[in-house]
């Protein structure tokens, strides 16, 4: 049975924008694939795209794609002005940020954050699962992104369909394209946002190789798949994921928790396919970045943002023509 989701206009954001719709879902865990929810193809307001400043790949030749676990990103945290200020600075530092740990029954925390980010004339937006706000969802993930440097294909935004419920919080998937280069030379990529439940980490982590392959082999021809997010603990085995040829973590030894105790957040990709990776990656140390005490840093997040840098050009250089560029609606 087809399910229709209303298009909601978010007032107050620069240029407006259409949110909260979805036309694709991933079916199953044992036979993972993506299929459209309906034949309709979603389109964003043309005016909202045309009002964006032009992206210049010569001035901004790379993208920084990040992940951070902000749990709990809830009304209490967003009620602290000094914490919100730090969160805004963190998100503004990246082109795409996969966020875990939003605690709410609607998209209000994301709307609030994006409004604060855009208060100085920036053009950030977000994407999350269409179930948020329409079903009983109390904790979820999201993607926050800079619309001047990337554009999202909202027809690809979906949550993993997990009938067996082996994921407590199913991964969120969305595809993007770099702005600036001509369409057939622009870097296209799909982000898989993972938020592992520590209480069932062994089960969930063992499925990540299946998730990665399903997204990569969904028929769209997109080989740049970035599996990012919270992986519970460095103590949990990732053997299944490392069975994928050339799978590479951006972070190998730096701790990603505020207390410096574990590598629990990461960015994984196929190093052979994703030759757009510049070799640069890192962990944002909140205490050093904002001159905070340990207590003040933990108030912002128990976890540190991790990031990896990629060229805006498909193949890592201008003039490379993508054989099958991922479609991006405008």
Image (spheres, rainbow, N blue to C red):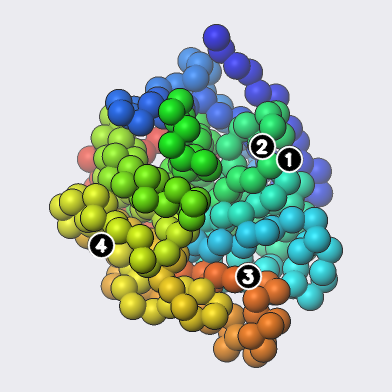
Q: Report which residue position mark 1 lands on.
A: 105
Q: Report which residue position mark 2 lands on.
A: 137
> Going from the N terminus, do you reach mark 2 or mark 4 first?
2
Residue drawn at (70%, 74%), measured in percent from left and top? 299
Q: Is label 2 in a helix, a strand or a loop?
A: loop
Q: Are marks 2 and 4 in contact (CB under 8 Å)?
A: no
Q: Are marks 4 and 1 in contact (CB under 8 Å)?
A: no
> Going from the N terminus, do you reach mark 4 or mark 1 first?
1
> Going from the N terminus, do you reach mark 3 or mark 4 first?
4
**Mark number, residue 248:** 4
Q: Is label 1 in a helix, a strand or a loop?
A: loop
Residue drawn at (61%, 45%), measured in percent from left and top? 140
| Mark pair 2, 4: CA separation | 32 Å
Asked whether residue 170 is in view, the answer is yes
| Mark pair 2, 1: CA separation | 6 Å
The front one of 197 and 292 is: 197
Foreground mark, 4 or 1, reads 1
> Going from the N terminus, do you reach mark 2 or mark 1 first?
1
Q: Report which residue position mark 3 lands on.
A: 301
Q: Are marks 2 and 1 in contact (CB under 8 Å)?
A: yes
| Mark pair 3, 4: CA separation | 26 Å
Q: Is residue 34 left or right of residue 260?
A: left
């Amino acid at each position: 049975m087809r399910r229709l989701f209303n298009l909601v206009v978010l007032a107050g954001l620069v240029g407006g924008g259409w949110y909260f719709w979805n036309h694709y879902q991933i079916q199953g865990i044992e036979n993972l694939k993506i299929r459209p929810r309906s034949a309709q193809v979603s389109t964003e307001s043309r005016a909202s795209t045309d009002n964006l400043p032009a992206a210049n790949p010569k001035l901004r030749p790379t993208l920084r794609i990040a992940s951070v676990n902000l749990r709990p990103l809830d009304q209490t945290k967003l009620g602290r002005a000094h914490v919100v200020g730090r969160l805004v600075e963190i998100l503004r530092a990246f082109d795409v940020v996969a966020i875990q740990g939003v605690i709410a029954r609607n998209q209000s925390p994301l709307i609030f954050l994006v409004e604060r980010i855009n208060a100085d004339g920036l053009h950030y937006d977000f994407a999350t699962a269409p179930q948020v706000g329409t079903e009983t969802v109390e904790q979820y993930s999201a993607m926050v992104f800079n619309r001047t440097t990337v554009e999202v294909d909202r027809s690809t935004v979906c949550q993993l369909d997990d009938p067996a419920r082996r994921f407590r919080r199913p991964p969120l998937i969305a595809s993007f394209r770099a702005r600036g280069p001509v369409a057939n030379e622009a870097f296209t990529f799909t982000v898989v946002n993972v938020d592992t439940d520590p209480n069932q980490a062994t089960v969930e982590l063992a499925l990540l190789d299946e998730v990665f392959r399903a997204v990569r082999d969904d028929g769209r021809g997109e080989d740049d798949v970035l599996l990012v997010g919270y992986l519970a603990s460095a103590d949990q085995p990732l053997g299944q994921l490392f069975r994928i040829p050339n799978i590479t973590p951006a972070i190998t030894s730096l701790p990603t928790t505020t207390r410096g105790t574990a590598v629990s957040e990461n960015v994984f990709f196929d190093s052979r396919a994703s030759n757009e990776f510049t070799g640069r990656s890192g962990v944002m140390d909140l205490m050093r970045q904002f001159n905070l005490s340990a207590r003040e840093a933990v108030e912002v997040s128990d976890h540190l943002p991790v990031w990896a840098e990629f060229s805006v050009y498909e193949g890592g250089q201008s003039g490379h023509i993508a054989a099958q560029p991922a479609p991006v609606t405008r």
